[in-house]
Amino acid sequence: MGLSFSTVVGGIDADNSMFAYRLQVMEKFLPIDYEKAERYATLQIVFHIPGKFYQLDWTGLTKPKFSRLNNTITIQIAVPKEFINDSDPTAFIASSINAAVSVVCPLLEKAHIDFDSDTIQSVLKKFDPLA
């Protein structure tokens, strides 16, 4: 199973630092199975977080980009301002990851590329029962 997060932040401030912190906490709950990691594709999710220096001019998810060389699929998510100020953005993060997984799974299946979405879904249920 492969899932990793990264962020593009438009300037760190008190509001968006909680969002970045919550991402780090959630990533620690992901199980690491090195045997599976070699067999399955990795989903790289890049969260774009607006700040005082950079505001987003797009919303939602971008089209996934697959790298056969690294066996990774990257999808980018724009974080709306209303979730930046949220004291606990966990539900938004979990639903965003769920949306990303639901977008990439059919593409990977069609290309006959293995991806362990069941493990990711089970981890998401710990954070958001609706995921």
Image: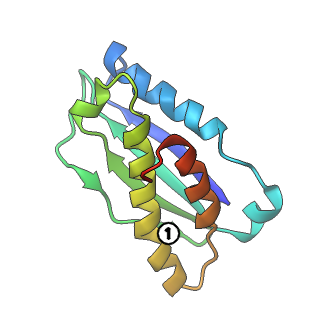
Residue 11 locus on image (x, y percent): 33, 22
User: Mark 1 sits on what residue?
Assistant: 66
Q: Position of residue 40 (x, y in %)?
A: 68, 68
| Residue under the point 64% across and 67% down | 116
**Is 86 placed above or below 102 here?**
above
| Residue at 40 percent of width and 50 percent of height | 95
Picture quadrant of residue 16: top left
Left or right, 55 with reference to 128:
left
Asked whether 69 or 19 is in front, the reply is 19
Q: Is residue 124 above or below residue 84?
A: below
x and y percent of residue 85 in the render?
28, 23
Q: Residue at x 60, y 79 (%)?
A: 113
Q: Secondary structure at mark 1?
A: strand
Disc 1 packing (10 Å; few <14; some 14–19; many ≥20): some
Type of amino acid at the residue the image marks with label 1: Phe
Q: Name the residue: 61% across, 70% down.
A: 115
For residue 22, above or below residue 70: above
